[in-house]
């Protein structure tokens, strides 16, 4: 016995019935993707009223990949990755730069 759902999707103009958090299956997947890529509009709330949320038209193709890169770059500017100092290239702990290695090998060759 399955229960019927008469509540429509929260997106304005969508005729499909809501399934999860007030959205139909297609718009819920879109909500998850927008959340995952940190582009979720503030109007897309959980359990929104039926036909109350405006849909978001996402860029596709090259424009879409460009928009994702820009969003990622904006996030990295706001919060640098943990464990690294800003402006300093990363290097494995205990490894010396090439210049120090050359100096050490030259000094060892001069001694021996």
Image (tube, grey):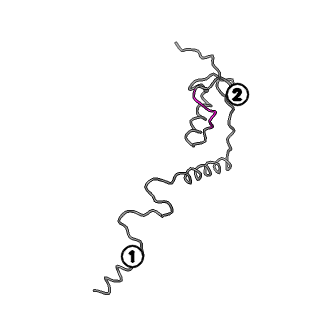
Q: Position of residue 66 (x, y in %)?
A: 65, 51
- Residue 35 lies left or right of residue 112; in this view the side is right
Q: Residue furthest left?
A: 112
| Image quarter of the C terminus | bottom left
Q: Quadrant of residue 83?
A: bottom left
Which residue shows up at 69% across the image and 32% down it? 54
Q: Secondary structure at mark 2?
A: loop
Q: Position of residue 42 (x, y in %)?
A: 62, 36
Of 51 and 109, which appears nearest the observer?
51
Q: Quadrant of residue 101?
A: bottom left
Q: Quadrant of residue 96?
A: bottom left
Q: Earlier in the sequence, mark 2 or mark 1?
A: 2
Q: Residues within 10 Å of mark 2 (few under 14, many from 20)?
A: few
Which residue shows up at 42% across the image and 64% down it? 91
Cα distance, mark 2 to mark 1?
Answer: 64 Å
Is 44 one of the magenta-colored residues?
yes
Q: Position of residue 5 (x, y in %)?
A: 60, 17
Q: Which mark is residue 12?
A: 2
Is 63 one of the magenta-colored residues?
no
59 lies above or below 93: above
70 lies above or below 13: below
Q: Secondary structure at mark 1?
A: helix
Q: Residues within 10 Å of mark 1 (few under 14, many from 20)?
A: few
Residue at the spot of label 1: 100
- Considering the whole magenta stretch, tell me its main secondary structure: loop
Q: Residue furthest right?
A: 13
35 lies above or below 97: above
34 lies above or below 47: below
**Residues rendered magenta in the picture:** 41-46
Which residue shows up at 39% across the image and 79% down it? 102
């Amino acid at each position: 016995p399955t229960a019927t759902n008469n509540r429509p999707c929260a997106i304005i103009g969508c005729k499909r019935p809501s399934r999860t958090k007030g959205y139909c299956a297609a718009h819920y997947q879109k909500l998850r993707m927008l959340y995952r890529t940190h582009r979720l509009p503030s109007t897309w709330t959980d359990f929104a009223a039926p036909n109350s949320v405006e849909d978001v038209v996402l860029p596709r193709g090259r424009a879409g990949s460009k928009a994702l890169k820009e969003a990622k770059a904006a996030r990295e500017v706001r919060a640098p990755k943990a464990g690294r100092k800003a402006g300093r290239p990363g290097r494995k702990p205990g490894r010396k730069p090439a210049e120090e290695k050359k100096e050490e090998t030259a000094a060892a060759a001069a001694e021996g």
